[in-house]
Amino acid sequence: MDEYDLIDVTDREETHSNTRNGETSELLIDFFITKASMADRLETSTDLATTSDHAVVYAQLRWDEGEGVKVSRKITGWDIHGLKSKEEEENYKKAQKDWKDKSSKRPVLDEKSSGDELQREAEWIQQNFVNHLNRYCKKVKVCARSKRWWTAEIAENRKILGSIKRSRKRGEASQQQVNKQRSNLRRMIRQLKTEMWRKFLTSATRDQVWQALRYTKPGGQQTTKALRSRSGEVAESWEEKAELIKEEAFPKPLKGVERKAQEKGGEMWKKITDEDIREALFNQSIQKAPGPDRLGFKVIRLLWDWDSQRIINIVKVSFRLGIHPRVWKEAKGVVIPKPNKPDYRVAKAYRVITLLKCLGKVVEKVAANAIAEECERRRLLHDGQFGCRKRRSAIDAVGRLMKKVEEVWGRGNTVAVLLMDVKGAFPHVAKGNLIKRMEEMEFEADLVRWVESFMEERKVIMSMDGKEGDSMEVEMGVPQGSPVSPVLFVIYLSGLFGQVEEKEKECGSEGISFVDDVAWVHQQKIFPSGRNGSVRVDMLRQSRQRHPGGRLLRARRQFNALRSISPSDRCFTVSSRSVGLLF
C-alpha cells in the first residue's frame, strides 16, 4: 500500500465505518482502495440498506465543474407507459402538441421527392424524435440490478432497514431489530419472486412456454474467453476478439455474379396500402430490442399516433426510389455464446445477434410481406422448402419426409437420407447472386432495387462483455434479425433443388429443407455396397457442388457413407460419424 501510495478510504479517521455488523461485534473487513491523491475527492458511505450483514461501500467521485470531460449517462430508452399515464396527462398533451407544431413546419415526402430528400427525412425523424423524448419523457436505464419483481413496497421496506441500521449505529436500536427487518425484507422478496414466476407461467403463450424453460437453465458465461485464430494465434484484448468474431460472422465477399438491379421501372410501391404499413408496425412485438438509436417499437407506435402520415410517406417513397436510407443500415451486433459448444476458445462458438433500427424494420416487414405473398401467389419456390413461409413449419417438413419414406417402403425399395446444412447461411448471401435470382423470378424492378440498397453499405457496432466498439463495415450477407432476411435467403436457395433433382431424377431424389437445413431423399431398389456394407451415394459428390447462390453445401458432420434402409427394420443405421434419421 505504501509503495504504490494507496489508502483505504473506508478506514480514514473522518469517514471510518464498520462494514460488517454482527450480533456481538462490528468489524471493518470490506475495503475501498484508491490513490492517496484522489482520496479528498471521494465521498464514501455505508448507509445503503441490503439484506446482507455486509454493508455496501458506496463511493462518489467529486469532479469540479469545467474539469475534464463530462460523461453523459447512457440510457436504454424512455418510459412511454409513464408518459401515457393519467399522472402525466398534461405533459403528454404538451409533448404531442409541440411535436405536431414542429412537424407541421417540415413537409412530408411525396411522389416527387428525391433520394437525397429521403435520406435527410430519415435522419431528421431519428434525431428530432430522440431530442423530443429526452425533453418530455423519463429516461430508462436498465442495469444488472433491474428486476421485474421490484416494487414500491420493497423500496419502502429497504428504506426502513436502512433507517434502523443508522439508528443502531447511534445506539437507538438493537441488532435484533435490524435482523427482524432484514428477515422481513428477504421474505417479501422471495414472495414477490414466486408470485411473478407463477403469474408468468399461468399467462404464458405457446412461445413463452419455451422461454420459461430457458429461464430454468443456468446462464451462459459473462466474459468472452481468449480466442484462438485459425492460424493458432491467441486474441486476448477486446479489439482482437471482436475482429476474430467479426471475420467469422461477417465474411468477406466471395467471387459471385456481378449483377446490378435495373435503375428504373417497377410498380410494387403502388400496391402498398396504409393498412399494410400499419400492420407491419403493430404486428411486431414491443419487447424486441431496439437498435443503436434506442427507438423501440413502443416509441415508433407513439410516433404513429402523433404523425402517421410521415411514416406512411417515408415507407412508400423508400420503395418507389428503391432506397433503404443509410441511417437505418447501422446496427448493433451483440455477441453471445452458442449453447453446448465443446470449445469456447474459437470464434465460431459465438453468434452475433443484429439489433436493427425499428423504423427501418417497419419498411423491411412491408418488403417481407410483399415478397412472401408474391412467392406464394405465383408458386415461385420449390415445393419442398419449409420455414419462412406461412403454414409451412418444421413439423410439416418432418411429416413430408416421413410420408416420402413410407411411400418408398410401400414399393419395396430402400431409402437413404443425406442431411446437410448451408454453411453460414444469412451472412454468406451474395448480393449479385440474389439480385440475379430475383430478376429470374420476375420480381418488380423497384423491389429488386430496394433489396440491392438494403444489402449495401451496412455497418455494425460490436457489443461484447458490456463494451461497444467502433462502427465496422459489413460487406456481405443479410442481417440476422431483419424481418426480410429469412424470405430473401429462401429465394436465394430456391434454385438449388431443381438442379439436383434433375440430375438424380432416375432415382426419384427429392429435396426437403427447413430454412438452411436440407435433407436429400434418395431411393433405389438395391444400393451398391462397398467395404463393411457402406453405401456409396452419388449425392455425396453432388453435395460439394456450388448451388446458384455461390456457397458450398457441406455436411453438418464429416461422414463416409450411409447404410441401406430395410423396410422391415423401419430404420437405417449409419456410421458413427454420419447423420441419419430413425423411424
Image (spheres, rainbow, N blue to C red):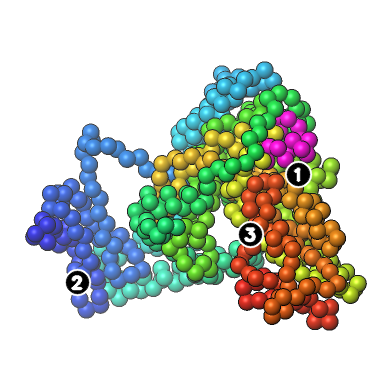
Q: Earlier in the sequence, mark 3 or mark 1?
A: 1
Circle 2 packing at 10 Å, graded few (<14), some (14-19), many (20+), is few
Residue sitting at x 46%, y 43%: 461
Extent of the magenta region: 434-447
Q: Between residue 409 and residue 94, name the one nearer to us.
A: 409
SS at mark 1 in the image: helix
Count numbered badges in the picture. 3
Residue most toward the right? 411
Residue 27: mark = 2
Tag 3: amino acid: Arg
Give how far across and how far down residue 266 sits, in percent: 75, 27
Q: Earlier in the sequence, mark 3 or mark 2?
A: 2
Q: Do labels 3 and 1 touch, CB within 8 Å?
A: no
Is residue 502 visible to the viewer in this orientation of the structure?
A: yes
Residue 97 falls in which quadrant of the image?
top right
Give how far across and how far down residue 111 sits, in percent: 69, 20
Residue 554: mark = 3
